[in-house]
């Protein structure tokens, strides 16, 4: 059966991959994207594209009251570092947009809503794997906006909304924006490995993250769209593995064959020292099978990055 989906942010890294997968399955997909960090060339063929802001009623009105089978709100300003430049913009783009789209969904008869949240909601965490029950205290305005969206979604359940928030960890893979050196640890370092003699790392090498490959993110996100077990839930989505920045740099050097001098610079505001996901809830509920580990994912991404123009 062909369904209708709204995937916001389909000119960006994650949104375009999700929209592509849904189109490949034969569904009809709409998107709203303001092209602030996304590119027209990322829009998959056959998508209904509205250029505009998800927080703008005028842009949303261009959807012409189409009743979607689900709304996947993926668009957003996606950098903790950038959220300090203009906190009001961050709130509008990451939180007001959620409210406007919830309103559209409820008024048009689409209660199903999937939200691209972030591990940044957690803030300062202990060194162990972090479960969804951990008390959130975000360190960046970006994290505050994502957490606020999650709460709006939770409260709107009393009006019939069926939300799921996915706290993505560090997503990486082909088509990530390699020219943006303020978002995406893997793309930031890999871009420098390929173009520079030196790699500048903002913050210590013993920081650690949980890197998860784009195809696994797309598979999980699309697999739960109509899964009732996920209604009202919040899930981590990382690989459930801890990798230090030092280990990541070593893996990029080894797999790319590029030897570079590493320069350690001061960290960025609101950066987390270390965080990785406890994936027990997702595993217990769905038994999700990953297709990529870091070695396999990085190999794919390096292969793409060396050939692509960016
Ligand atoms: N990449 C990651 O590792 C990661 C981790 C956690 C959460 N997320 C979240 O996932 C989502 C997608 O991230 P991404 O890495 O694909 O980023 P991206 O910058 O590549 O994509 C975001 C897209 O949304 C568009 N956009 C931004 N604000 C908009 C608005 N107000 N209205 C319409 N379009 C808008 C941009 O033009 C871009 O095409 C974001 O919400 C981000 O916060 C990403």
Image (cartoon, helix red, strand yellow):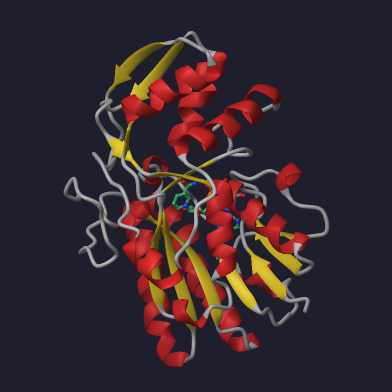
Seen in the image, is 71 located left or right of residue 166? right
Relative to 75, residue 273 above or below: above
Q: Quadrant of residue 286?
A: bottom left
Residue 174 position, x and y percent, is 62, 38
Q: Nearer the viewer, residue 276 or 75?
A: 276
Between residue 25 and residue 115, name the one nearer to us: 25
Q: With respect to residue 258, does 294 lie above or below? A: below
Residue found at x 42% / y 16%: 199
Quarter where residue 131 is shown: bottom left
Q: Is residue 13 left or right of residue 95?
A: right
Pick out the residue farthest to the bottom: 159
Residue drawn at (66%, 69%) of the image: 6
State which quarter of the image contains the C terminus.
top right
- Residue 89 in the image, given as x and y percentages of width and height: 45, 54
| Residue at horizontal 75 percent and vertical 42 percent from the top | 41
Can the viewer see residue 178? Answer: no
Residue 151 locus on image (x, y percent): 35, 73
Location of residue 35 in the rendering, given as x and y in whole percent from the top left corner: 65, 48
Which quarter of the image is occupied by the N terminus?
bottom right
Q: Which quadrant of the figure has residue 31?
A: bottom right
What is the number of callouts on the image?
A: 0
The residue at the point 46 percent across, 91 percent down is: 159
- In this picture, residue 5 sits left or right of residue 136: right
Visible residue check, residue 129: yes
- For this orientation, the residue located farthest to the left is 126
């Amino acid at each position: 059966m062909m369904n209708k989906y709204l995937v916001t942010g389909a000119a960006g890294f994650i949104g375009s991959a999700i929209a592509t997968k849904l189109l490949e399955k034969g569904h009809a997909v709409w998107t709203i994207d303001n092209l602030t960090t996304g590119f027209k060339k990322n829009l998959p063929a056959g998508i209904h594209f509205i250029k505009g802001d998800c927080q703008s009623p005028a842009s949303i009105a261009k959807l012409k009251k189409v009743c979607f089978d689900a709304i996947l709100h993926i668009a957003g300003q996606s950098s903790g570092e950038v959220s300090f430049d203009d906190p009001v913009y961050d709130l509008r783009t990451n939180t007001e947009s959620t409210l406007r789209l919830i309103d559209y969904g409820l008024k048009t008869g689409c209660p199903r809503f999937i939200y691209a949240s972030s591990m940044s909601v957690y803030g300062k965490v202990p060194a162990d794997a972090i479960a969804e029950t951990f008390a959130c205290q975000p360190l960046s305005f970006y994290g505050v906006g994502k957490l606020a969206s999650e709460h709006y979604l939770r409260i709107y359940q009393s009006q019939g909304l069926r939300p799921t928030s996915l706290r993505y960890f560090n997503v990486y893979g082909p088509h990530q924006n390699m020219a943006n050196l303020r978002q995406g640890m893997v793309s930031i370092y890999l871009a420098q490995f390929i173009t520079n003699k030196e790699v500048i790392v903002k913050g210590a090498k013993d920081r650690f993250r949980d890197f998860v490959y784009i195809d696994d993110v797309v598979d999980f996100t699309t697999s739960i769209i109509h899964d009732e077990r996920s209604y009202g839930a919040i899930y981590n989505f990382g690989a459930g593995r801890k990798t230090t920045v030092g280990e990541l740099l070593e893996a990029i050097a080894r797999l790319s064959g590029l030897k570079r001098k590493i320069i350690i610079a001061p960290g960025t505001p609101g950066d987390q020292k270390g965080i990785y996901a406890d994936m027990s809830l997702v595993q217990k509920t769905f038994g999700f099978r990953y297709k990529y580990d870091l070695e396999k994912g990085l190999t794919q991404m390096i292969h793409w990055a060396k050939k692509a123009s960016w």
